[in-house]
Image (cartoon, helix red, strand yellow):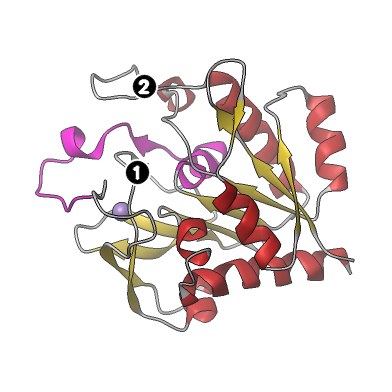
Amino acid sequence: MKPFIGITSSYGDEKTLNTSYDNIDSITQAGGVPVVLPNVPTAEAINVTIGKLDGMLITGGGDIDPHLFNEEPLPNLGLLHPQRDQFEVALLNEAMARNLPILALCRGCQILNIAAGGDMYQDIYSQITKPLLQHTQRAPRSFPFHTIHVTEESLLKKITGKSKYRVNSFHHQAVRRLAEGFHISALSDDGIIEAFESSEHSFVLAVQWHPESMATDGDVPSRKLFSAFMNACQQNMA
Ligand code: MN
């Protein structure tokens, strides 16, 4: 049986679900069966959903409500979808409690950290005083844009075999204080946390970039990331 993978979704407008086919195609390509999850934040819906899934892909999207980590909104905060935040926080906490494999991408990286008790920059450019790299690339979506330095003893290093490589970048928010139970798996040259992973779960990995857009364009490290996620989901089924 192929693993059944829940893909979280965003909003096109307030009445429309929205997710990129790159998310769907990356799961299919790696050997999984994808299902797109609507943002229904009730405990019952979440329990039933998680009970049917073998893994979860937490996708990218808009900004995150700063009240989730006890901050007021700053001027450069972007578009929020509070119901999505609420759904994903509850979904992630339940998934982690059940040791379900999780791959979190971009916004997914930040919401995972917040669900676990960490916090984030609402806008890196106005909140970090030292010079930063450009993290919102003006280049094709799959283009490897800035370098990441991968932690030697990390799952990410084990998966990709690489200590340093380039990834795409489409974020102005980023993880600030990493939640307990997680460790950093990659940093950019300017010290932004570009990937982290759980020290306690079998496969909980978050990346600040969009490997789904690179994997569907043939990028080898991105393909390996999705394959490793699918292997973890397979093992979880056994
Ligand atoms: Mn970046």
**Which residue is located at x 34 percent, y 44 percent?**
174
Magenta range: 107-134
**Which residue is located at x 33 percent, y 43 percent?**
171
**Which residue is located at x 48 percent, y 47 percent?**
109
- Image location of residue 14, percent across then percent down: 56, 15
Query: Is residue 153 on the magenta stretch?
Result: no
Label 2 amino acid?
Glu
The label shown at residue 174 is 1
Label 2 near ligand 1 (CB < 8 Å):
no
**First reached walking from the N terminus: tag 2 or tag 1:** 2
Q: State the residue in front, 216 or 73.
A: 216
Q: Measured along the vertical axis of the image, is residue 117 above or below residue 203?
A: above
- Image location of residue 133, percent across then percent down: 17, 53
Query: Is residue 116 on the magenta stretch?
Result: yes
Q: Residue 201's image quarter?
A: bottom right
- Circle 2 packing at 10 Å, graded few (<14), some (14-19), many (20+), is few
State the separation of the CA atoms marked 2 and 1. Answer: 15 Å
- Tag 1, which secondary structure? strand
Residue 202 visible in the current orientation: no
Q: Measured along the vertical axis of the image, is residue 77 above or below residue 190?
A: above
Q: Measured along the vertical axis of the image, is residue 34 above or below residue 65?
A: below
Q: Is residue 77 left or right of residue 13?
A: left
Q: Measured along the vertical axis of the image, is residue 83 above or below residue 216?
A: above
- Image location of residue 105, percent across then percent down: 50, 50
Label 1 amino acid?
Ala
Quarter the C terminus occupies: bottom right
The label shown at residue 146 is none
Quickly name the residue at label 2.
71
Q: State the residue in front, 100 or 20.
A: 20
Label 1 near ligand 1 (CB < 8 Å):
yes
- Tag 2, which secondary structure? loop
Q: Nearer the viewer, mark 2 or mark 1?
A: 1
